[in-house]
Amino acid sequence: MKIINDSLTISTEGFNDMKDLTPLVAEKLISHRLQDGLLTIFVPGSTAGVTTIEYEPGLVEDFSRFMEKVAPSNVPYNHDRRWGDGNGFSHVRASLLGPSLSVPFSGGRLSLGMWQQIVLVDFDNGPRDRAVILHFLGE
């Protein structure tokens, strides 16, 4: 059994910017020559999250619209009063999505469904470079 830690750096625009990580993560899996195991994907910070979705333009737009209804960006947040950074909505959205995801792999391939991609969603109120930690446990 091997444990391999790796990472990605992803540039984002904020405001629900969704990035498909699947090809990058699959390349990392191939480069580490692991066949079977479990991958944990983790984004440090409190204004972004990771999940799976069918990454197509309509659903990406639906997801963004849903988040605006659940945690609107145009209402007051106590966090904003305390820190003055105007991103209280992004913290709420990220806490709903969560910072990590586990994906099994078998035969050297991610065990994802046909229409399922791994995505990073940046909810913050501006562009940034996001670190994404990849923790492979397998053989």
Image (tube, grey):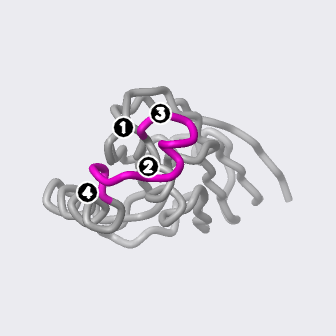
The quarter of the picture where the N terminus appears is: bottom right
Q: Closer to the N terminus: mark 4 or mark 1?
A: 1
Q: Mark 4 = which residue?
A: 64
The residue to which callout 2 is attached is 90
Q: Which amino acid is tagged 3?
A: Asp
Measuring from the top left, give residue 49's x and y in whole percent.
50, 53
Q: Are marks 3 and 1 in contact (CB under 8 Å)?
A: no
Tell me the amino acid under the disc marked 2: Ser
Whole-Å distance between the Cαs marked 4 and 1? 11 Å
Disc 4 secondary structure class: helix
Residue ID for mark 3: 85
Three-letter amino acid code at the position of disc 1: Gly
Counting from the top left corner in percent of width and height, residue 47 is at 51, 46
Tell which tag, 4 or 3, sits nearer the viewer. 3
**At 31% from the left edge and 62% from the top edge, which residue is drawn?**
67
The magenta stretch spans which residues? 72-86
Residue at the far left in the pictured view = 58
Give the spatial CA distance, label 2 vs label 1: 9 Å
Do the numbered discs 2 and 1 sit on residues whose CB atoms are within 8 Å? yes
Residue nearest the viewer, comparing 24 with 97: 97
In the rendered image of this protein, does residue 42 appear above or below residue 66? above
Nearer the camera: disc 3 or disc 1: 3
